[in-house]
Image: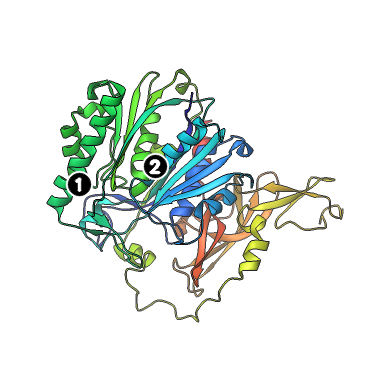
Amino acid sequence: MVGIAAYGAYIPRFRLGAATDGWNSRQERAVANFDEDSVTMAVAAGVDCLGERDRDAIDGIVFASTTPPYAEKQCAAIVAAALDLRRDIFATDVTNVLRAGTSALKSAIDTVAAGSARQVLVVAADNRQGPPRGETERAAGDGAAAFIVAAEGVIAESVGSYSITDNMLDTWRAPGDAFVRTWEDRFATEEGIERIVPEAVSGFCARQGIAPADVARVALYAPDGRRHARLARQLGFAESQVQEPLFGMLGNTGAAFAPMLLASSLSSAAPGDLLLAVSYGDGSDVLGFRASAGITAAPRPVMGVDGWLADKRVLDSYETYARWRDVWTLDDAARRPPAASPSVSALWREGDKNVRLYGARCRSCGYVQYPAQRVCVECRKYDDGEPVRLSDRPGELFTYSMDYIAGAVDTPLVVAVVNFEGGGRALCMMTDRELDEVRVGLPVEMSFRKLRVVNGIHNYYWKAIPQRRLARMTAAV
């Protein structure tokens, strides 16, 4: 029995909303911070999905996005390293189309069904940009979803799929384009989504011998709330069958949209429920899942979609978001010489320290050091350390400083010293913070983020953030 064994999600902390000066919209949408992108959000969703599972059991990873940071370099490899997965796994990227998330999920299902892997991690993430204050920007949102596809311990069994591929130029983005382009609305609606998706759903129902009334919940893609409601009625689904699309709270998360709604539907599914994930983009994928008896007892993600939605901060000004996205440059921006290009050999050499966030535990006395050293500073034992992953450990702010002249995008730059639970101390930056919450003793956790981009090289590292996931975990105990 092949299907979904675990699921998770990630939604950035910040929102554009009614209280945001200059946003001029009552709709709320999630926005990635200046140091977040599709890779960092995929890592966060992967952490939420993996939980306490054995990461060595993952045999493959599929990364799906229309906004990968690299045009030529595998992003799945970065995500796999940050999640501390094995090196002897297969990895692939699925990109350039809005239905990449469901295509990645179908590929993982086929891989496990064929016996090529036991467990495959699928992560879908997007942070698409529309022209400032336009309809695309208002309807869009940033976020990620993740699933473990397996043959054992399944909470939702795969019960088939149906796909249509159709060359349809209604939404596109050429190399170098900062914003998504769209064609005339009526053409895109009538000849695009409202023609293709009904054909795909009808094909799935005919293949499975079911009717729309047999579906308990449908995770349905649509570019905005108006067309979502219209499409659901056209497909013959009652309002109670349609998973809440989260427009006005989250927004359309692109390749991660249908997968995220599927993850949300799994959190409330009962045994026997038939769930559909319906995507759109140069065609449509329809994936069916039947909730198993184990879904009620299976561990749920610590945050999930609901947890991330509830933990939010609304930005005071649209200018902050515009500065994060380089929509415009403010005159008061700090003047600094261009940043030096990072050393590729140094990035490779220090991957365990910077990407996997490995410290070292002394086998003799148990003392934990970060970064790893050959000599234990506690007992002076030489070359007797073992790697220890610090990325998923809770921490506490030991001390900090605020730098107002560093030229950071998010002034002031907060430099923090973090003490990890169980030992270990790290010097790092702090992000996703409000200045009034930064204090000695603040509970923090680590988040994979982007330091800078120079010469096309995306330099990633772990930063401290006020506890979100771990705070919810503690509150639930």
Give the numbered dot on residue 246: none
Q: Which residue is mark 2?
A: 103
In terms of image quadrants, where is residue 133?
A: bottom left
Instruction: Tell me which amino acid carries mark 1.
Output: Gly
In terms of image quadrants, where is residue 279?
A: top left
Q: Is residue 348 left or right of residue 74?
A: right
Q: Nearer the viewer, residue 149 or 297?
A: 149
Instruction: Tell me which amino acid carries mark 2.
Output: Ser
Mark yes or no: residue 112 visible.
yes
At which x and y percent is residue 34?
A: 42, 62
Q: For label 1, count other residues whose C-alpha is less than 10 Å away and answer few (under 14), some (14-19) or many (20+).
A: many
Q: Measured along the vertical axis of the image, is residue 95 above or below residue 258? A: below
The quarter of the picture where the C terminus appears is top right
Q: Nearer the viewer, residue 121 or 352?
A: 121
At which x and y percent is residue 284?
A: 29, 41
- Disc 2 + disc 1, Cβ < 8 Å: no
At which x and y percent is residue 377?
A: 81, 57
Determine the residue positioned at 70% across, 58% down: 371
Q: Which residue is mark 1?
A: 192
Q: CA distance from mark 2 to mark 1?
A: 19 Å
Q: Nearer the viewer, residue 240 or 178?
A: 178
Q: Measured along the vertical axis of the image, is residue 348 above or below residue 65? A: below
